Image: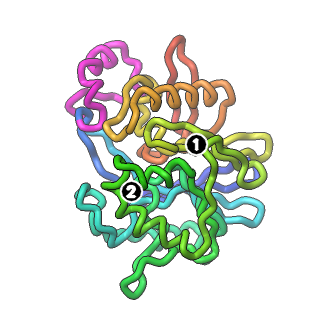
Amino acid sequence: MSEHHATYRLGNAVITRIVETQFPLAFSTLYPAAVEDIDEAIARRILPVDFTAAQEIVLSVHSWLIEIDGLKILIDTGIGNHKSRPFSTLFHQLENPFLQRLAAAGATPDQIDYVLLTHLHTDHVGWNTRLVDGAWQPTFPRAKYVLPRTELEYFFTPAGEKRRMLFDDSILPVICTNQAVVMDADGGEILPGIAFHPAPGHSAGHMVISMRSGGREAMFSGDAMHSPLQVARPEWGSTYCLDPRTAMASRLALLEQAAESGALILPAHFPGASAGYVTREGEDYAWRYC
């Protein structure tokens, strides 16, 4: 494992993490409603890291590259370069070597067959497109971009209007080239062994993506949880969740399924090795990195 890559095998699939960037956030910023609970959680020693409320939480922004049966599939596409994001200094007008890191992992943009998007937040759709001669063009010219219908529709609601710039620079260009495939709200299989599952709450139509190969299962959990802390404390909702109560229900369902099935969990923002397993410890859940 390198700083920017980590590789896992699942049956005949090879899964590689490609990191775009990492950044720290204060606990009180990411989980403001949980500040009163942290001392008790530390005292019980149920958290998966040596943690105090004064510490920062490191979040990783990365994509997952799947190579299976001759296909190259990308799960989420990070923040992107040259994107105007005035609502976030962390994501505004970046210059990250993501495509070079993707190439180092064994894939060039024209080799990607599918881009599967768990949801349409700014740090998950940015590399859908890149700036070419002053215009936004699909980064992956051969790929089908699969995206949740409810997420797409949200841009055209009053609440979604303020983020329409994401739609304009990162979604509309792949619609205009007929590369977009819209996944209905109840999910379903998009390729043999690869399926979308509704997991709303973080965003209107957030999805978890599952993959089966060689009798094993992996689950790309998107933003159902942002940190291993939420495995031990699933009731801690992040500040980025649209509907914290629904997000918690989706997270609990994911954790229960993961603990029962032994699936490999590949979140979108966990630092370190990023991937791991969920187990039961009494009435709680626990996280174990690969």
* Residue 74 visible: yes
Point out the residue furthest to the left here.
54
Q: Please, what secondary structure does the residue beneath circle 2 have?
A: helix
Location of residue 142 by image quarter: bottom right
Q: Which mark is residue 122?
A: 2
* Residue 126 image offset from top left, x and y in percent: 42, 64
Q: Residue at x 51, y 22 (%)?
A: 285
Q: Is residue 8 magenta?
A: no
Q: Residue at x 58, y 54 (%)?
A: 7
As for residue 47 lying within the magenta part, the answer is yes
> Can the viewer see residue 103 in this picture?
no
Q: Residue at x 60, y 44 (%)?
A: 185
Span colored in magenta: 29-55
What number is the disc on residue 58?
Answer: none
Q: Tell me which amino acid carries mark 1.
A: Val
Ranked by sequence position, the earlier of labels 1 and 2 is: 2
Position above or below: 289 against 269: above
The residue identified by callout 1 is 208
The amino acid sitting under disc 2 is: Thr
